[in-house]
């Protein structure tokens, strides 16, 4: 018997294939363009969107046998959810599965930037022993950590930072004060958080309301010498120019960027700044987090293909 197909726009972990294999064949495409997806999905029952994979309304409408759309992550802004809902196609995602890995990466970048680890490594390898007298790292003890977006990731980061004796504040209009208080965290509006924080970590969702929330005027209000780290979505920052300006005039002491808009990131002068650390949207992709993400995603896809209700679905109204 020939199995139906699930098309993926990027590599799929073996454990997910093991879960899905009894129900469908997983086919990875090397060309996830809209034109190619429209062809591949004509007889597919599922699609997995990885990396820069995008699923637009025309492609969904051109896929008559499509039964499930899956995102290997928490974000789903690359899916035309309304079009999927109109077709009664569930969109599954994996909220929380990679939260701890992202929080750990955020903590790692706080330490790397504050302690200037990459700078010292370069200076030593260049034979500049005297550089130890030329600059100083920063302390975490007594510093204020500002977390923008206090969901699963933000709360995990607060737990990780607490033993460093940091003062922790957060901005999230959707989180109850009691939740923050249980973790010893004070909720503030965004401007207050920026003006008080020595480290600002972005962990907010990408929505129309949040797009460009870190803009030129906001950075004028930031505490001088602060560090800004973005492991959420590139769209949260107005553009890279404002980061370059803030690094050059000293308002920002350092920047850590794992996400960009668009992706893959286009070249920009800020990437050459010695106090800017970058990664290709990779820091959440630990083996442990990928196992959790793909197990959750594949289990929910399999449930739908068996006619059952999934655990995590963006548009639950399709089951009504």
Image (tube, rainbow, N blue to C red):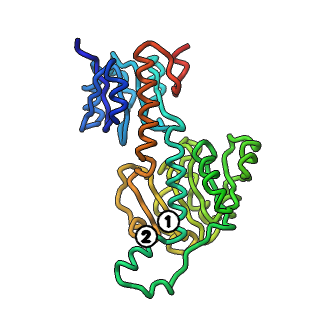
Taking 176 as reference, is 295 left or right? left
Taking 202 as reference, is 190 left or right? right
Residue 315 coordinates in the image, percent (x, y): 52, 24
Residue 75 coordinates in the image, percent (x, y): 48, 38
- Residue 246 visible in the snapshot: no
Taking 214 as reference, is 132 left or right? left
* Residue 118 circle label: 2
Quarter assignment of residue 9: top left
* Residue 237 circle label: none
* Residue displayed at 69% across by 67% down: 142
Residue 150 coordinates in the image, percent (x, y): 63, 46
Count of numbered labels shown in the rendering: 2
Quarter of the image that includes the C terminus: top right
Tell me the element at label 1.
helix
| Residue underneath mark 1 | 112
- Residue 18 visible in the snapshot: yes
* Residue displayed at 50% across by 38% down: 97
Tell me the element at label 2.
helix
Taking 284 as reference, is 144 left or right? right
Residue 109, relative to residue 293: is it above or below?
below
Query: Between residues 117 and 194, which one lies in front from this camera angle?
Result: 117
Q: CA distance from mark 1 to mark 2?
A: 7 Å
Quarter of the image that includes the N terminus: top left
* Residue displayed at 46% across by 60% down: 240
Circle 1 crowding by C-alpha within 10 Å: few under 14, some 14–19, many from 20: some
Residue 113, relative to residue 189: is it above or below?
below
Mark 1 vs 2: CB contact within 8 A: yes
* Residue displayed at 60% across by 53% down: 160
Query: Between residues 11 and 64, which one lies in front from this camera angle?
Result: 11
Query: Between residues 188 and 2, which one lies in front from this camera angle?
Result: 2
Circle 2 crowding by C-alpha within 10 Å: few under 14, some 14–19, many from 20: few
Residue 118, relative to residue 54: is it above or below?
below
């Amino acid at each position: 018997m020939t199995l139906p197909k699930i098309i993926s726009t990027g590599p799929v972990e073996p454990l997910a294939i093991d879960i899905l294999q009894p129900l469908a064949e997983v086919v990875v495409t090397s060309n996830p363009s809209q034109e190619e997806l429209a062809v591949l999905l004509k007889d597919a029952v599922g699609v997995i969107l990885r990396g820069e994979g995008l699923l637009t309304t025309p492609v969904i409408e051109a896929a008559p046998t499509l039964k499930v759309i899956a995102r290997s992550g928490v974000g789903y802004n690359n899916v035309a959810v309304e079009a999927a809902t109109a077709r009664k196609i569930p969109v599954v995602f994996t909220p929380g599965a990679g939260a701890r890995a992202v929080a750990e990466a955020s903590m790692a970048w706080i330490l790397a930037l504050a302690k200037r680890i990459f700078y010292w490594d370069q200076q030593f390898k260049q034979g500049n022993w005297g550089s130890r007298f030329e600059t100083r790292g920063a302390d975490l003890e007594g510093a204020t950590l500002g977390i923008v977006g206090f969901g699963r990731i933000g709360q995990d980061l607060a737990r990780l930072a607490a033993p460093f004796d940091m003062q922790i504040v957060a901005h999230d209009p959707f989180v109850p004060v009691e939740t923050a208080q249980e973790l010893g965290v004070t909720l503030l509006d965004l401007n207050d958080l920026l003006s008080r924080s020595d480290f600002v970590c972005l962990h907010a969702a990408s929505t129309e309301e949040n797009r460009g929330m870190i803009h030129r005027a906001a950075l004028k209000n930031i505490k001088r010498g602060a560090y800004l780290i973005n492991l959420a979505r590139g769209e949260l920052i107005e553009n890279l120019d404002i980061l370059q300006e803030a690094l050059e005039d000293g308002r920002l002491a350092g920047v850590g960027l794992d996400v960009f808009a668009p992706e893959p990131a286009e070249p920009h002068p800020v990437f050459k700044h010695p106090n800017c650390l970058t990664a290709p949207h990779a820091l959440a992709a630990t083996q442990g987090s990928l196992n959790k993400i793909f197990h959750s995603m594949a289990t929910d896809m399999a449930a739908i293909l068996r006619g059952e209700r999934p655990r995590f679905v963006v548009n639950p109204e399709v089951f009504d």
